Image (cartoon, rainbow, N blue to C red):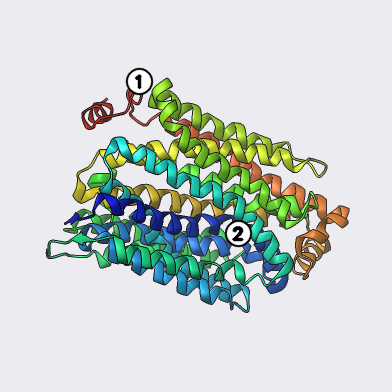
């Protein structure tokens, strides 16, 4: 199988990838900005984190599947199929009538989104040589900057002046243009071969991850139920591991994940994903519910995070040349705990600017970690495994997002129960579920203090994971001199073997 694309059509394919990337990138900020208002109308604040977790759970589960299938059947059919599923979920999410239905449709969205990031990144790896790829990734990184500005702005304007349903329906025209672009310009020569898809591994993996997510979310459930779910998780995880060892074409290659470079890069990416999604889910709540600011202001604090990310990617080549990949990676990871520390000092009287600075530093650090991980992992494997290798990075980030959103949501609920015991806790949930949403919290000093204290437990969780991310990046094997000049294939292999 190979790509058959004229050089003149590569920019058109990149433009289609940019549209697909924008569709996923804007999803993070536009939904996070609008969620407090959605909860105010639909109720069910206890399941707030599941709106994020359901999407990320489905995305995490399917990322490695799409990556594997793209190696077998080609990039184009997997990508277009994923976009169609994502658009179906987006259309239905706009018609959600309850928090339960919204979570279900977000799950469908995630099933499609699992294809977009790994397959588009793999296509870039197929079409461009290593020395060209960084420039293209810089262009794609600018999409995140654009979405960082338009996402919170669009989210704030939509919930203030239109129905919140449009935060999902806005994906429809973008997705249709993307499908047209890939249909017209991306052509593949696929050599037929017999494929043995690891269906059993996929089922076992999905059951194990779902069980873990429910355990982390339903902290107030009966102990017998939690024990049963824990048993299901342990048994299915063991069976999944055994299945992947004997499957002819495992959905997750244990041989690939056992490589030190791949394993450490994936662990660092997973931890970074946990920290960032924790920030994304709890910071808008703090800005609106404690600082008393509008959804638009809350969105712009997240804007700084997604501005820092693509800025780091665009500057990465210059930083590699000046300082080497090793120092750049470790300096970037150091920004994680530094940025997270800003959250620990937030008070009800703080300026949103402080939260924005912390977001920017964490985003910048994530940009350096992500671009280094993707480039190193892609160049460590042959073409036939590039889809799976790229998907492993995206999967790790998505799984980290899933674990982070669920864990931080559980910590928040525990904090509310701890600091707002008795009538105050009931009143807090009653206020949150009012149409006015979180904005009414700031007018009640007692409830505001409870929310402030509970959210700081979540901030400590973000800071702890940020410290672990910093520590893990020191284990990634990169030579001291790698990246000081435009890397060649030979130089990259030397860097990998050190």
Tell me where residue 405 sits by quadrant.
bottom right
* Residue ID for mark 1: 480
Q: Position of residue 89 (x, y in %)?
A: 48, 72
Q: Label 1 neighbourhood size at 10 Å, few (<14), some (14-19), many (20+)?
A: some
Q: Which mark is residue 242?
A: none
Q: Label 2 neighbourhood size at 10 Å, few (<14), some (14-19), many (20+)?
A: many
Q: At 63% across and 77% down in the image, what residue appears? A: 98
For the C terminus, the quadrant is top left
Q: At 26% across and 61% down in the image, what residue appears? A: 69
Q: At 73% across and 36% down in the image, what residue appears? A: 345
Which of pointers 2 and 1 indicates the residue nearer the eye? 2
Task: Judge left or right: residue 258 versus residue 41.
Answer: left
Q: Can the viewer see residue 120?
A: no
Residues 83 and 273: in front is 83
Q: At 52% across and 38% down in the image, what residue appears? A: 311
Q: Position of residue 281 (x, y in %)?
A: 61, 54
Count all numbered tags in the image, as a single digit.
Answer: 2
- Mark 2 and mark 1: Cα distance apart in space: 40 Å
Q: In what element is the residue under mark 2? A: helix
Task: Judge left or right: residue 159 versus residue 309.
Answer: right
Q: Which mark is residue 30?
A: 2
Residues 155 and 426: in front is 155
Q: Can the viewer see residue 34?
A: yes
Q: Confirm or deny contact between disc 2 and disc 1 (CB under 8 A).
A: no
For the N terminus, the quadrant is bottom left
Q: In what element is the residue under mark 1? A: loop
Q: Position of residue 388 (x, y in %)?
A: 28, 52
Q: Position of residue 322 (x, y in %)?
A: 42, 21
First-in-chain label (2 vs 1): 2
Tell me where residue 210 sits by quadrant.
bottom left
């Amino acid at each position: 199988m190979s790509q058959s694309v004229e050089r003149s059509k590569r920019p058109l394919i990149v433009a289609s990838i940019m549209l697909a990337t924008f569709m996923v990138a804007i999803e993070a900020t536009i939904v996070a900005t609008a969620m407090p208002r959605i909860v105010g109308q639909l109720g069910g604040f206890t399941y707030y984190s599941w709106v994020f977790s359901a999407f990320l759970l489905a995305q995490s589960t399917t990322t490695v599947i799409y990556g594997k299938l793209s190696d077998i059947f080609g990039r184009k059919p997997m990508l277009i199929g994923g976009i169609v599923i994502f658009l179906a979920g987006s259309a239905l999410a706009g018609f959600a009538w309850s928090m339960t239905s919204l979570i279900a449709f977000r799950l469908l969205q995630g099933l499609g989104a699992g294809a977009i990031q790994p397959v588009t990144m793999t296509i870039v790896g197929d079409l461009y040589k290593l020395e060209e790829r960084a420039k293209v990734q810089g262009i794609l990184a600018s999409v995140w900057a654009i979405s960082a500005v338009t996402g919170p702005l669009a989210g704030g304007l939509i919930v203030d002046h239109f129905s919140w349903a449009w935060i999902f329906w806005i994906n429809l025209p973008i997705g249709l243009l993307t499908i047209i672009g890939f249909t017209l310009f991306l052509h593949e020569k696929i050599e037929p071969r017999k494929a043995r898809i690891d269906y059993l591994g996929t089922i076992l993996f999905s059951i194990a991850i779902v069980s873990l997510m429910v355990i982390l979310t339903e902290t107030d459930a009966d102990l017998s139920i939690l024990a049963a779910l824990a048993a299901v998780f342990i048994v299915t995880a063991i069976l999944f591991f055994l299945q992947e060892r004997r499957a002819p074409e495992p959905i997750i290659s244990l041989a690939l994940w056992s490589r030190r470079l791949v394993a450490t890069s994936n662990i660092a990416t997973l931890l970074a994903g946990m920290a960032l999604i924790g920030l994304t889910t709890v910071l808008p709540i703090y800005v609106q519910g404690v600082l008393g600011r509008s959804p638009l202001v809350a969105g712009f604090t997240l804007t700084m995070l997604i501005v820092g990310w693509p800025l780091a990617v665009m500057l990465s080549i210059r930083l590699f040349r000046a300082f080497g990949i090793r120092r750049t990676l470790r300096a970037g990871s150091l920004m994680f705990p530094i940025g997270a520390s800003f959250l620990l000092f937030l008070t009800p009287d703080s300026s949103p600017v402080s939260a924005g600075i912390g977001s920017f530093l964490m985003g910048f650090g994530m940009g350096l970690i992500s671009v280094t991980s993707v480039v190193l992992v892609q160049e460590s494997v042959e073409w036939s495994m590039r889809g799976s290798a790229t998907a492993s990075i995206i999967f790790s980030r998505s799984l980290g997002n899933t674990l982070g959103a669920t864990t931080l949501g559980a910590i928040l609920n525990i904090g509310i129960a701890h600091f707002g015991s008795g009538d105050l806790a009931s009143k807090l949930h009653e206020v949150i579920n009012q149409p006015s949403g979180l904005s009414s919290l700031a007018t009640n000093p007692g409830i505001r203090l409870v929310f402030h204290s509970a959210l700081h437990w979540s901030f400590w969780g973000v800071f702890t994971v940020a410290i672990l991310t910093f520590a893990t990046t020191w284990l990634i094997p990169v030579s001291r001199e790698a990246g000081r000049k435009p890397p060649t294939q030979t130089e990259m292999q030397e860097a990998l073997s050190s």
